[in-house]
Image (spheres, helix red, strand yellow):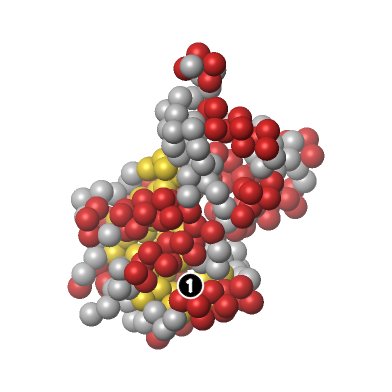
Amino acid sequence: MTEVAVVTGAARGIGLATTRRFVNQGMKVAMIDRDADVLLEEAKQIGDAAVPIVCDVSIPEQVDAAVAEIADGLGACNALINNAGVADFGPIAETSFERWRRVMATNLDGVFLVSQAMIPLLAKTAADSYASIVNIASISGLRASTLRVAYGTSKAAVIQLTLQQAAELGELGIRANCVAPGPVNTKLALAVHTKEIRAAYHDALPLNRYGSEDEIASAICYLASKDASFITGQLLAADGGFEAVGIGLPALRS
């Protein structure tokens, strides 16, 4: 029986890289994204193994419709990857409640809504094979930084939500883990990180470079797989060592 993955935020970046890696492993993937044009084009490029589903994960009715489509069309889910997210950077004093809620609605509410709606399908699949949830947080959920009050707080909450999922869903045979990427060469990062910001990140990272989307996808796919069958409730920081060095001065490591 063909294994099935569900990936949110699958139209680009880490979600798309993860989708491609699953497909290369012989899985079918339900690609969820609210950007219909990009989603349909990328799914077309991947081929029959990709099933595009247009859905805004922050809207309960759309989530329920998407999960019903997955159940009817694919009938299973071995791996749910909650990757959909938005970024909003700005000072606390200038972050309106509207901006705060926009970030929380996708980054946190979306993870809760999709995971909750998928529980029956994941539990059914776990009984026959295996099932896991991998939530995508961020290094910003582990260490504070300026201009990330909404984004960092949302990602910290995703880490705690992962622990709640692991504690409650384990008895159903569903594992739940979390990946916290550090600086990654996504289109967003390339667009908003100036030369000076990139240089500063390079100095702060023990590996002295940004990660790639495929490197993060590799970590995600490992935690989602049967190879990680006794791992649940864990956080994997795929960050080039960024978290490990804390706020130490790069000059002291030279």
The answer to whether one can see residue 10 in this image is yes
Is 60 or 219 nearer to us in this picture?
Answer: 219
Q: Quadrant of residue 123?
A: bottom left
- The residue depicted at 64 percent of the width and 49 percent of the height is 190
Q: Secondary structure at mark 1?
A: strand
Outermost top residue: 252
Q: Amino acid at mark 1?
A: Met
The answer to whether one can see residue 65 in this image is no
Is 135 or 21 nearer to us in this picture?
Answer: 21
Give the x, y percent position of residue 13: 54, 59
Give the x, y percent position of residue 37: 64, 77
Picture layout, residue 37 above or below residue 138: below
- The residue depicted at 37 percent of the width and 43 percent of the height is 236
Give the x, y percent position of residue 80: 39, 64
In the image, taking residue 26 as reference, residue 29 lies left or right, namely right
Is 69 or 15 nearer to us in this picture?
Answer: 15
Q: Characterize the local packing of mark 1: few (<14), some (14-19) or many (20 or more) Cα atoms within 10 angstroms.
A: many
- The residue depicted at 61 percent of the width and 32 percent of the height is 199
Look at mark 1 in the image and give the residue it sits on.
31
Give the x, y percent position of residue 54: 57, 76
In the image, taking residue 186 as reference, residue 241 lies left or right, namely left
Quarter of the figure with the N terminus: bottom left
- The residue depicted at 48 percent of the width and 45 percent of the height is 211
Outermost bottom residue: 72
Q: Quadrant of residue 94?
A: top right
Picture layout, residue 45 above or below residue 160: below
